[in-house]
Amino acid sequence: MAGILFIISAPSGSGKSTLVSELRKQVSGVDFAISWTTRSPRGSEENGREYNFTTREEFERMIDEGVFLEYAEVFGHFYGTARQSLEEARNAGHDLLLDIDVQGGAQVRAKMPEAVSIFVLPPNPKVLRTRLRNRSRAEGVVNEAELYRRLSEASKEIENYREYGYILVNDILDRAVAQLEAIVLAERFYRNGEAIAYRSRRVLEVAAACLQMNAHERLKPVLEAFGIDGRSGGQQLLFGEDQDDD
Ligand code: ADP
Ligand code: 5GP
């Protein structure tokens, strides 16, 4: 049975990695593609676990050799998904989850239109700023320039939400994890006819509510807060005073 390819994208700090790791604890048969990157390891990251870390020269050689299904330059570093991840998941009959940026998401959708794409949003700019700052503190390095760079990109990345089939607002973690799990189970049900037991109706309802076409009401305040769809205000919240971040 062919596995399902899930693409998950979000502005940095939205909680995508947290959601993915919670999902993988609860749902079996989902492989995670460990990307290649030229950025340095952060905090407790280990080579071969969160990422395969490499040099720019090696990454460029891999591009020339056609190793990547997709790759992009994000925040001044290369990130890419090796084709091999897809082959391994296929051979194992597993689904595969790609945590990639919006540029990579567009490349994969063009090659594999059957992929299921999920965009994760933070509830508002202030929460995003707090999460990014708290993560940096937990990792023992607060790099203001890097924080600024990631925040500056957030609104631009969010503008791409329309390209994604499902939208998650990661406000309360447990709820967002349950929604992500429901999307995976619902897609397995629709595509592979996989049973989802007594919870099935509820799971299908939760997943359907996350479809982009059904998410407008929930999305509206989030987009407004980020100054998207013709309104302003997001930038001020992103870069405003920091007094209540602790
Ligand atoms: P991303 O992978 O999108 O860059 P992370 O998963 O690293 O983001 O999350 C950024 C920070 O926010 C981490 O410190 C994480 O523990 C925290 N976080 C993630 N989701 C939530 C949530 N729903 N509520 C509160 N904090 C969260
Ligand atoms: P971070 O440095 O915070 O781990 O990731 C920065 C951004 O790079 C995130 O948006 C993340 O989704 C993206 N990213 C991680 N791996 C890949 C990849 O293999 N390809 C692409 N295109 N983006 C990636």
Image (tube, grey):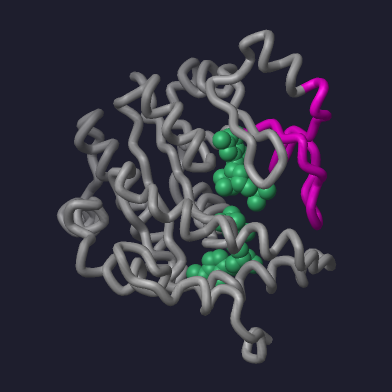
Position of 229 with respect to 95 (left or right) is left
Residue 179 percent coordinates (x, y): 34, 58
Location of the N terminus by quadrant is: top left
Which span of residues is magenta-colored? Answer: 34-58
Residue 129 versus residue 58 in the image, above or below:
below
Quarter of image, ligand 2: top right
Residue shown at the point (67%, 17%) measured from the top left: 63
52 inside magenta stretch = yes
Which residue reaches farthest top? Answer: 65
Position of 215 with respect to 118 (left or right) is left
14 inside magenta stretch = no
Location of the C terminus by quadrant is: bottom right
Residue 217 percent coordinates (x, y): 20, 68
**Quarter occupied by residue 80:** top right
**Quarter occupied by residue 223:** bottom left
Q: Could you say which is closer to the camera, residue 234 or residue 58?
A: 234
Residue shown at the point (59%, 72%) measured from the top left: 129
Residue 190 percent coordinates (x, y): 20, 35
Is residue 205 visible from the viewing direction of this image? no
- Magenta stretch: helix, strand or loop mostly: loop
Residue shown at the point (77%, 72%) measured from the top left: 137
Number of marks in picture: 0
Residue shown at the point (45%, 27%) measured from the top left: 107
Residue 164 percent coordinates (x, y): 33, 44
Is residue 42 visible from the viewing direction of this image? yes
Q: Could you say which is closer to the camera, residue 88 or residue 212?
A: 212
Residue 167 versus residue 79 in the image, above or below:
below
